[in-house]
Image (cartoon, rainbow, N blue to C red):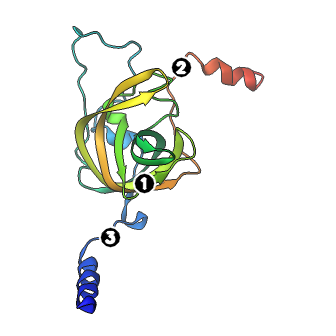
Amino acid sequence: MRVGVLFTVAVGSLLLPATTAAESLKIGWRDLLPEGHAPLAPQKIRPTPSAKPREIALSTALDGKTVELSGYLLPADREGELVYAFMLVQRSGACSHMVQPPPSQVVRVVPEEPYRLSMNYEPVSVTGTLTAGLEKTQLFILDGVAVIESGYRMSMAQVANADFVEESRPPTPWSFLGNREQGK
């Protein structure tokens, strides 16, 4: 009987589509914007309750597709150094050191298996099926609790360390620090 169970499991696993990096479409953060939309800059001030909500534009062109995207990991659900869910953001420091990026530039990721984190904002590459849709996640960050809105989700994603994360940084009030260090 045990052989029959193993055979069924083996045959059944052959019928499931495998998600590999070779079969995925490598995308950048601009690809998460619908065609014709410019990237939104992060809000400079937190909105007031009476403020009109910003229009949120998401791309549906990649909805349901297997993609690979690199960014920075901000843990949402963790136990010690194991991360069970996280936000993938374009810039290191987003959401805790800076104002939250627009939802179109935040992906909520649930890894296939817990990811062993070595530091917050660790650069990672994530491969999985992208799903468009707004979702709010509560995080504990440096300033306390924050609610982060993501425009996309990847479940059962494969996560790997990234040596390089393509980043387009908008100007910040701290950019003069980099120039001072380089003697400019």
- Disc 1 to disc 2, C-alpha distance: 33 Å
Left or right side of 115 for 85: left
Question: Relative to residue 75, is residue 175 drawn left or right?
Answer: right
Q: Position of residue 124 (x, y in %)?
A: 50, 49
Q: Amino acid at mark 1?
A: Pro
Could you tell me which residue is drawn at 45 percent across and 45 percent down? 79
- Residue at (57% x, 46% y) in the render: 118
Looking at the picture, which amino acid does disc 3 mark?
Answer: Ala
Note whether 158 is above or below 183 in the view shown.
below
Above/below status of 132 relative to 150: below
Q: Nearer the viewer, mark 1 or mark 2?
A: 1
Residue 177: % across, % down: 67, 20
Q: Secondary structure at mark 1?
A: loop
Quadrant in the picture for residue 33: top left
What is the CA distance from the residue labelled 2 to the residue labelled 3? 41 Å
Dot 3 corresponds to which residue? Answer: 18
The residue drawn where x is 48% and y is 22% is 98
Q: Label 3's element?
A: loop
Along the viewing direction, whichever of 136 and 129 lies nearer the viewer: 136
Residue nearest the observer in this picture, 113 or 150: 113
Say which quadrant the C terminus sits in.
top right
Asked if the residue under mark 2 is in contact with the one under mark 1, i.e. CB atoms within 8 Å, the reply is: no
Please identify the quadrant where the N terminus is shown: bottom left
Residue at 59% across, 18% down: 174
Q: Position of residue 112 (x, y in %)?
A: 37, 58
Secondary element at image label 2: loop
* Residue occupied by mark 1: 114
| Distance from Cα at disc 1 to Cα at disc 3 | 19 Å
Q: Which residue is mark 2?
A: 172
Would you say 43 lies left or right of 122 here? left
Q: Nearer the viewer, mark 1 or mark 3?
A: 1
Q: Residues within 10 Å of mark 2 (few under 14, many from 20)?
A: few
